[in-house]
Amino acid sequence: MKRALKILNETFGYSEFRNHQADIVATILDGQDALVLMPTGGGKSLCYQIPSMVRDGVGVVISPLIALMEDQVSALKLLGVQAAYINSTLSAPEVKAIEDKAVSGKLDMLYLSPERLSNDETLAFLKTVKLALFAIDEAHCVSQWGHDFRPEYQKLSVLSEQFPDVPRVALTATADERVRDEIVQQLKLQDAQLFISSFDRPNIRYAIEEQERGQQQLWEFISQNHAEDAGIVYCLSRRKVETVAAFLSGQGRIALPYHAGLSARMRAKNQKQFLMEDGVIIVATIAFGMGIDKPDVRFVAHFSMPKNIESYYQETGRAGRDGAPANAWMAYNYKDVVMQRQFIRDSEAGDEYKNILHDKLDALVDLCEQLECRRITLLRYFGEELAEPCGNCDNCLNPPEKIDASTEAQMALSAVFRTEQKFGMMYLIDVLTGNKKEQRISEFKHNKLNVFGIGKNHPKTWWRRLYRQLISLGYVEVDEQFGALKLTDKAKPILKGEESFYIRDVVKAKNKTAQNDDLELGRHDTILWNALRQLRTDLATEHGVPPYVIFSDASLLEMVRKRPVEGEKFMYISGVGEYKLAKYGEMFLKVIKENPLPEKLDNRLEEEVNVSLDHFLELQSVEAVAETLNLNIKTVYAHLSQAIAAGLVDRKAVT
């Protein structure tokens, strides 16, 4: 493990392994197989990259997407690692050159698609190469029960047959127990060591609300919380992707569509712009995002409900990979549930599989309607128990009121039954609220029913919400052809008074979202921060890679906080290894030296004290500082008293 730690420090710039990383690396170095479940941003790639560099031979990484291969190989090359990929974008001579390097032992890692491993020529080529390991990324794709099933993954069992002495590691961020079992079975990993990290992503704040105001609701979330941030908006259909992207662009944001209906060239162009530029929003179907390594995505917004919790977890996990606060926001609509159920019914799957898909959708609906901590519900689905509410989701920050709506649910279901299950939601609400202007009610003599007008004590919006929840939770289904509501067997206990029905309070809570307090920089720190980001952008453009491949935001922020001015101290910045020190150190140190703190601010006082002091030195007025910073005047005096004690300002100047 000494060499592994040396590579971790000198190549990748980290001082120690996190969570299970050390045990996983040790297992592979010992030649054993491993199955790794680790959340997005947890450092899965290091678990096979470092063993590939330590063990003799080439580490073969099986990755499902060309973009992911190219991204990881570019990042590794900038670290001085000998890495390459073979995919359909390369010419025959280029492929031959890479194969020759692998055979001659000049590669540390080779990235391949799962389709290539089903090719006899590829297997024959690998027989001529000294192999260090096989890493199967996104291993949940092997499972027919999973949310990203890819048949070609099931053919990877050939690796255990053809290369029995080469250790294999399968990695995924999303797999319940059923999917884990299938990964083991399909890939023949019965003897593999199992490593399960916590599924919790504590830096992500979860919030789910009903979609009531359409695109305006989405815009309020983005404009109020992420005015300049990069983010992903997920929609269910291509048409909705295009519509939402156009809407956000009309609001002044750079918003790019991404879906299968676009040409491969346009998808690649939009993805590259998202990765390379700051503040870009991608509006996408679920086809976007697997393996996307952009660490500074500050929000993921679902403007359509995904098909299950696995998809929701994986897609929201693309936010906040850098560990800084991020938001996962969803506005769901009962029509999304109806559409997802229709997808399941129309699929060619067998009844057993359809039942499982319905159960998975039910679990997601339950998460949406949940009254308790969202994180508790989310983690429980993956078999993990949280000791106490997280304090970082909408239900914890703005606890919803639990309302017993059993009587009203009986009324709503009775209206469906009494009108012979032939009418849509709005008509039924007119019946319940006693709308005498609706002519059809008198024509069908529904004004004579005992349910006519019994719900007039609630507004129509209240009944719409109740019906939406009854539909979402499976008590009522919508006729796909005519839109009529029909009762399911699940409705009978409520109609008979044998089961209670609770709903969330309709009062909209205050909007609280995750904020990155680390980026609350003082004026002089902001100047350095912007200068470092500009240098990073220039270098990224020069090398043709995303900016975060040069240095992450976290590394730049640490440079701002610590302000190293020599190479030895620069080496202690997280993410700076020997290779990056040699390649970029001088340039970044030059920028730091060119943007020093004023002498009086180069101290160890708290940041807010320095901010008050900085403004006081400029404004020469305590009152002006309080007004500018929106602080109580006593707070400003308290800050300046610390500056006086540190000898940074004259007492007479303050009084």
Image (tube, rainbow, N blue to C red):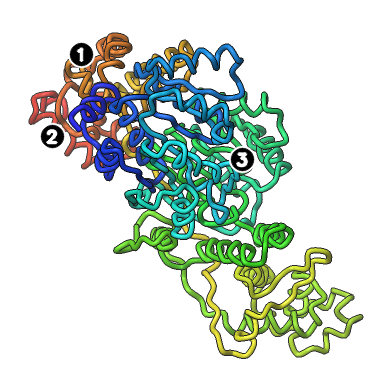
Q: Choose between 131 and 411: the one closer to the eye.
A: 131
For badge 3, the amino acid type reads Ala
- Mark nearest the camera among 3 and 2 is 3
**In which quadrant is the C terminus drawn?**
top left
Is 465 located above or below residue 311 in the figure? below
Q: Measuring 20% from the left and 24% from the top, which residue is drawn there?
A: 572
Q: Is residue 355 left or right of residue 159?
A: right
Q: Secondary structure at mark 1?
A: helix
Is 406 located above or below residue 79 in the figure? below
- Point out the tag, 3 or 2, that comes first from the N-terminus: 3
The residue under label 3 is: 287
The residue under label 2 is: 641
Please indicate, yes or no, whether residue 217 appears anywhere in the rendered image. Answer: yes
The residue under label 1 is: 567
Q: Measuring 83% from the left and 85% from the top, which residue is drawn there?
A: 447
Q: CA distance from mark 3 to mark 1?
A: 43 Å
Q: Measuring 91% from the left and 80% from the top, which residue is drawn there?
A: 443
Residue 605: which quarter of the image? top left
Q: CA distance from mark 3 to mark 2?
A: 57 Å
Q: Is residue 445 left or right of residue 297?
A: right
For badge 2, the amino acid type reads Ser
Graded by Cα atoms within 10 Å as few (under 14), some (14 to 19) or many (20 or more), the crowding at tag 2 reads some
Residue 640 drawn at (x, y percent) = 17, 32
Residue 218 drawn at (x, y percent) = 59, 46
Residue 400 drawn at (x, y percent) = 46, 67
Is 247 located above or below residue 339 in the figure? above
Q: Choose between 319 and 355: the one closer to the eye.
A: 355
Graded by Cα atoms within 10 Å as few (under 14), some (14 to 19) or many (20 or more), the crowding at tag 1 reads some
Do callouts 3 and 2 mark residues in contact (Cβ within 8 Å)? no
